[in-house]
Every structure is written in C-alpha cells, then in structure tokens.
Image (cartoon, rainbow, N blue to C red):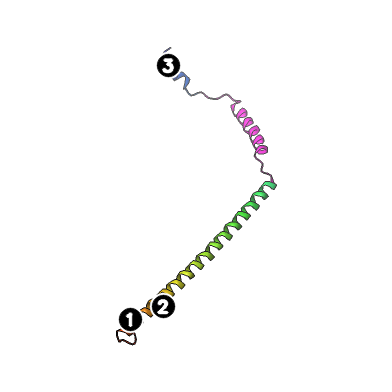
Amino acid sequence: MQFDDQLRDAFRRQEPDAAFAVRTMAVIRSRSREDRGRHRVSPVWLGVAAAMLLVLGGISLALNHQKAIRARQEVELALRIVTQTLTHVQMKLEEAGERKGMPDGR
C-alpha cells in the first residue's frame, strides 16, 4: 500500500460507535463536577476583594482631590504674580508718561 492510500484510509470519515455519545457526556459531567469544586470562590475572598477595591478607589479620589486643590492654588498664585506684574508695568508707564508731560500716561 502506498503512502497516499494510507493517508486516505486514515482520514476517511468513520461513524462513531453507539456508545461514543454516552462516553463523551460522562466525561463532560465528571469534569464539570471537578471544575465546580476547584474554581469556587469563597465569599470571604469576594469580600476582601471588594474592600480592597473600595480602599483603592477612596485613595484615588483623595489623590485627585489633592491634585485639584494644588492646581487651583498654583493658578491663584500665577494670577497674583500676573496682577502684580501688570500693576508694576502700569506704574512704570504712568511714571514715563508724567516725565514726558502727559499727566494720564497717554
């Protein structure tokens, strides 16, 4: 028998025997029973995971709140600096205008 014929015979469709479905279902049932016990998550661990998520969420909110406060403080400081700088420039312009004989700085 040639190799091609052997391959054809090996890959020829064959109907399974009558007990195949019964054996397959038995294996599926036994594995699902084993998996149910093996992958069960304890309610205690679910509680621990939920508590950790709440704590991490609270920490995240607190950090974001602190960042927002810090950003607001930095903006307020920047506005104070800009106001002081503009006031200083306005005073210098008024002084220069008065030196040139223009009383209102124009």
Q: Secondary structure at mark 2?
A: helix
Q: Tag 3 or tag 1, which sits nearer the N-term?
A: 3
| Rendered residue at 62%/29% (across/down) | 22
Q: Secondary structure at mark 3?
A: helix
Q: Tag 3 or tag 2, which sits nearer the N-term?
A: 3
In this view, the mark in front (1 or 3): 1
Q: Badge 3: few (under 14), some or many (20 or more) residues near its Cα, within 10 Å? A: few
In screen coordinates, is 2 left or right of 50?
left
For disc 2, the marked residue is 87
Residue 44 visible within the image: yes
Instruction: Identify the image quadrant of residue 30.
Output: top right
Say what amino acid the circle numbered 3 marks: Asp
Badge number at residue 96: 1
Say what amino acid the circle numbered 2 marks: Thr
Residue in the foreground of this view, choosing between 72 and 78: 78
Residue 106 visible within the image: no
In this view, the mark in front (1 or 2): 1
What is the C-alpha distance between the residues marked 2 and 3?
99 Å
Name the chief secondary structure element in magenta. Answer: helix
State which region is magenta.
14-42
| Rendered residue at 50%/65% (across/down) | 71
Residue at the far top: name it. 1
What is the C-alpha distance between the residues marked 1 and 3?
108 Å
For disc 3, the marked residue is 5
Q: How far from the left and from the top, in percent, is residue 29?
A: 64, 34
Q: Quadrant of the C terminus?
A: bottom left
In screen coordinates, is 81 left or right of 102?
right
| Rendered residue at 33%/81% (across/down) | 96
What is the C-alpha distance between the residues marked 1 and 2?
14 Å
Residue at the far front: name it. 99
